[in-house]
């Protein structure tokens, strides 16, 4: 199954212009977290905040909509948001926490909830888990190497990064340029090569760009909790939706990419097992 278990899939975007301006795609992650915060469904959210070093995100406990919106946009490097979960519960005293993460990070959170070794009374405070689609991720030094070495820019100058249409795109004040993805292969973290989840199958709600037009997101509602929060946000006018069948390129492309990732990952797992290396699955 390419997409995992889900209730509904739609194309959607935030209606708030301030979110649209800074979001990576449809701003669904930021809009949902802000809505949940304002409705007291969550009391705070762990997001990938910016630091003084360009494109070096840091897991951040956001306590206001402004802090959530300040962390919008994709950083194509690691932001292990789960590392602040215990602090959010123990030091901040939060009883209801929202968070966002790549599929592997969501897997980690669900594992914490199912086998709470050292996370008892922590992982059950997660009230909204939003997953983002993910094909691969890069160590920050890798980003630096190909942005500076192959794209003739510097991380400090880049305003936005994006992957789409077979290229890694950067926008800096002077230009937008794309690097063919075959040039970035080998720079991804090695663990991504055995990853079998593209669309964050274990999240409450997952969102990504593939399948929907620019400025919109493809969104899966998965759990009862996720579907309830998403539906309430749509009814409140915070998010607008379109049926997937009405948008291009639609689910066919997403399915192709999700299955491609699973096949490739499975082959790499088999190759490693045949070499006598351990497999986590
Ligand atoms: C490494 C990576 C690879 C991706 N690959 C794909 C892909 O192949 N196809 C696809 O459709 N989508 C991919 N995405 C997801 C996509 O780029 C957007 O994050 C997603 O569409 C949500 O957009 P939005 O406008 O709803 O979110 P926004 O409102 O812009 O919010 C994004 C949220 O994600 C958080 N965030 C940003 N970077 C990270 C990070 N590295 N780790 C954890 N949280 C983070 C931010 O703090 C923010 O809360 C990828 C994302 C990442 C981080
Ligand atoms: S490809 Fe998989 S392992 Fe790599 S960051 Fe994305 S979800 Fe995590």
Image (cartoon, rainbow, N blue to C red):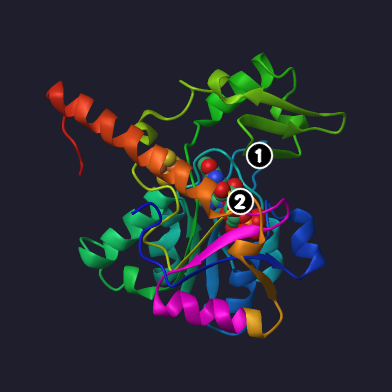
Q: Is residue 217 magenta?
A: yes
Q: Nearer the viewer, residue 234 or 257?
A: 257
Who's the residue at 39% across and 43% down the image?
A: 259
Who's the residue at 70% across and 27% down the image?
A: 178
Q: Nearer the viewer, residue 94 or 5?
A: 5
In the rendering, at what x and y percent does residue 249 appear?
63, 49
9 relative to 74 in the view: left or right:
left
258 relative to 238 in the view: left or right:
left
Tell me: residue 163, above or below residue 235.
Answer: above
**Within-10-Å neighbours for mark 2: few <14, some 14–19, many 20+:** many
Q: Which residues are magenta?
A: 212-233
Q: Residue furthest top?
A: 149
Quarter of the image that includes the N terminus = bottom left
* Residue occupied by mark 2: 209
* Residue occupied by mark 1: 162
Of badges 2 and 1, the one in the foreground is: 2
In the rendering, at what x and y percent does residue 198 appear?
43, 47
Who's the residue at 60% across and 63% down the image?
A: 245
Does mark 1 have its CB less than 8 Å from ligand 1?
yes
Whichever of labels 2 and 1 marks the residue nearer the N terminus, that label is 1
196 relative to 276 in the view: left or right:
right
Quarter of the image that includes the C terminus = top left
In the rendering, at what x and y percent does residue 223 appear?
40, 74
Residues marked 2 and 1 touching at CB (< 8 Å) = yes
Q: Residue furthest right?
A: 174
């Amino acid at each position: 199954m390419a997409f995992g278990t889900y209730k509904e899939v739609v194309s959607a975007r935030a209606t708030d212009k301030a979110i649209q301006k800074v979001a990576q795609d449809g701003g669904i992650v930021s809009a949902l977290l802000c809505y949940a915060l304002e409705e007291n469904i969550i009391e705070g959210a762990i997001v990938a905040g910016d630091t003084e070093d360009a494109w070096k995100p840091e897991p951040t406990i956001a306590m206001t909509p402004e802090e959530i919106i300040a962390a919008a946009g994709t950083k194509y490097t690691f932001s292990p948001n789960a590392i602040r979960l215990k602090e959010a519960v123990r030091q901040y005293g939060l009883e209801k926490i929202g968070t966002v993460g790549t599929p592997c990070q969501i897997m980690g959170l669900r594992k914490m909830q199912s086998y709470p070794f050292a996370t008892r009374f922590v992982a059950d405070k997660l009230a909204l888990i939003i997953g983002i689609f993910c094909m691969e991720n890069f160590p920050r030094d890798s980003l630096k190497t190909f942005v500076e070495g192959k794209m003739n820019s510097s991380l400090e100058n880049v305003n936005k990064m994006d992957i789409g249409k077979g290229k890694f795109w950067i926008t800096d004040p002077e230009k937008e340029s794309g690097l063919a993805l075959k040039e970035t292969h080998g720079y991804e973290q090695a663990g991504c090569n055995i990853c079998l989840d593209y669309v964050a199958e274990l999240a409450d709600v997952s969102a990504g760009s593939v399948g929907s037009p620019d400025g919109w997101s493809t969104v899966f509602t998965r759990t009862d909790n996720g579907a309830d929060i998403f539906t309430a946000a749509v009814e409140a006018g915070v998010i607008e939706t379109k049926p997937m069948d009405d948008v291009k390129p639609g689910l066919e492309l997403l399915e192709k990419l999700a299955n491609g990732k699973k096949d490739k990952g499975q082959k790499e797992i088999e190759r490693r097992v045949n070499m006598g290396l351990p497999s986590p699955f």
